[in-house]
Amino acid sequence: MSLSNPEMHDPLSLAEALITCPSVTPATGAVFNVLEAALLPLGFAVDRWVMGEAPDGPVENLIAVRTNGTGRHFAFAGHLDVVPPGSGWSSDPFVPERRGALLHGRGAVDMKGSIASFVAALPQCLELPGTLSLLITGDEEGAAVYGTRAIMERMAARGIQPDLCLVGEPTSVNRLGDMVKIGRRGSVNMWIDVRGTQGHVAYPHLADNPIPRLLRILCAIEAITLDEGNDWFQPSNIEITDICVGNDATNVIPAAARARISIRFNDMHTGAGLEQRIRAIVETEGGTLEAKISGEAFLTPPGDFSALVSAAIESVTGVTPELSTTGGTSDARFLSRLCPVVEFGLCNATMHKLDEAVAEADLMALRDIYAAVAKRVLG
């Protein structure tokens, strides 16, 4: 779908064009064509590439850069992939529909609407000194294997180094502007496997039941209090998310028992440290552990950047945002290694839900907020 120049300045039209492209994670192709078509007339050099194979790929990524003399480099990061829409929508999730004052469609909030608002803000910022860039992936809602981390590697190879980065995740809760994220908890999933010896329940001395050993492991894990939280983070938590034996017989001692746990942790821990702690418990009962660290906790301490973003929000909405680290993970967990990062975007009430929708007025206001942030960073 092509966009004329006036439509490029309209976040609503651009959001509709992006929603029209089905881009269930991992995403490639048409949705990136729409974004590139909006950026090229604004003077951005666009670098697109596809990498990876199923099941975690192929994934498309985009880096767009525009430099106007010397000055700071302000980056905007986001994702064009969306979660599967599911069934039960009132209308086709990939046919954007305006109903009342709302725009409906998968990705309207998370986060094609934010990307559209940022692009629509750019014409107000082209005369600012310095560098503007967009770092856009098609792999945030999925495994995040070939997405933002690959973008960071590509940036390093090209010598691209932002000074500040804004991630356009939907952070607002009750109204646009009421919350900015300055950090996120880390995430690690662990799979516990306890092996025994199968046998007849009437002859337990000839078998080795793994279930009691798994239960002792889980009880020891459940008894852990990782911390009480700190000034900026809520307490870390461990949740048992699955227990599986798969024994269909009533008179058989099973040969294996398995469980899965998920830990969301604050900046008082590391993923590796938590893995080591849980592994020690598992191994005391002869079990094995597999762990996957999705991301480490990070914090951008309140300071000039968060104050700047807050001032921009207040100038447009009159709302003073709360600085928070609540919620799930985002690609900010990777980008925080590059430079100070904050997250700010639309209201998140309908993200990942049926009939996902954004208020049309919020798209317009978000455009003006993003422009105000860029002017404060580069001006």
Image (cartoon, rainbow, N blue to C red):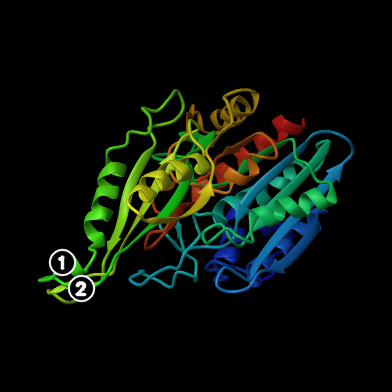
Q: Name the spot of residue 102 as percent of width and height, x first.
A: 44, 55
Q: Residue at x 38, y 70 (%)?
A: 86
Furthest toward the left, the residue is 202
Compared across the picture, whether 324 is left or right of 259 comes to: right
Which residue type carries mark 1? Pro
Q: Which is nearer the N-term, disc 1 or disc 2?
A: 2
267, 175: nearer the viewer: 267
Quarter containing the C terminus:
top right
Q: Is residue 12 above or below residue 232?
A: below
Could you tell whether 220 is left or right of 290 in the image? left
Labels 1 and 2 touching (C-beta < 8 A) = yes
Labelled disc at residue 199: 2
Local secondary structure at mark 1: helix
Residue on which the image places disc 1? 204
Q: CA distance from mark 1 to mark 2?
A: 7 Å
| Residue 101 in view (yes/no) | no
Whether residue 158 is visible: yes
